[in-house]
Amino acid sequence: MLIKDIIDEDFTNYKKVSMYIGTAICDFKCCKLANKDKSMCQNSEWINRPTIDIPNEAIVKRYIQNDMSKAVVFSGLEPFLQFSDMYHIISEIRKLSNDDIVIYTGYTKEEIKPYIDALKKIPNIIVKFGAFKPDDLESNSFTSHFDEVLGVQLASPNQYAEKIS
């Protein structure tokens, strides 16, 4: 899988200690919706990072061998643009563990319905839906909100997490 980062024990993106996998591909939907350039992206520092090509099996092995992490978080850039690799990793982890799998996406549930339908067949999948909306923050019309499912603050009012399976 092509990634920008992997953190074995992340404490910021989910309520449980998680392996964080930062995916490498994005269509910059959030930027386009806001009519802004890529610099407004909440993951803009990731764009110019080197891309790492790590075998899917190596990610699975790394997760299973880590006793601290109790979940896996796939996040931005945009994980659903690498669905095949992500699905393979999730399927392999699920054979060895029932830990939570969390996927952060800028898409709505309707935009990625076929992917959500496929993931619903795998237990303990949580998806955070919704594009980052920088105008809400710039206008001070909104402050971040706490998402009960993730146990973390989310930046835009349209963002929410849902356990889909």
Image: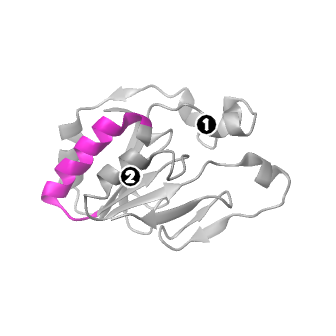
In reply to whether residue 98 is colored magenta, the answer given is yes
Most foreground residue, 103 or 162: 162
| Number of other residues with Cα within 10 Å of mark 2, as a class: few under 14, some 14 to 19, many 20 or more | some
Indicate whether 145 appears above or below 59.
below
On residue 116, the disc is 2
Circle 2 SS class: helix
Most foreground residue, 42 or 127: 127
Tag 1–tag 2 contact (CB < 8 Å): no
Please indicate, yes or no, whether residue 139 appears anywhere in the rendered image: yes
> Please, which residue is most extreme toward the right here?
139
Q: Choose top left, top right, bottom left or bottom right for residue 124.
A: bottom left
- Provide the major secondary structure of the magenta segment: helix
In reply to whether residue 71 is colored magenta, the answer given is no
Kindly report the distance in space between the C-alpha atoms of the residues bearing marks 1 and 2: 18 Å
Q: Amino acid at mark 2?
A: Ile
> Please, which residue is most extreme toward the bottom here?
148
Residue 114: image location, x then y, percent: 38, 46
Mark 1 highlights which residue? Answer: 29
Which residue is at 43% across, 41% downward? 79
Residue 40: image location, x then y, percent: 70, 37
Q: Choose top left, top right, bottom left or bottom right for residue 82.
A: top left
Which residue is at 56% across, 63% downward? 160
Most foreground residue, 2 or 8: 2
Circle 1 SS class: helix
Residue 112: image location, x then y, percent: 45, 45
- Which quarter shows the C terminus? bottom left
Please indicate, yes or no, whether residue 44 appears anywhere in the rendered image: no
Q: Look at the image and give the residue range highlighted in magenta.
A: 81-99
Residue 31: image location, x then y, percent: 67, 36
On residue 71, the disc is none
Q: Amino acid at mark 1?
A: Lys
Is residue 71 toward the left or the right of residue 46 in the image? left
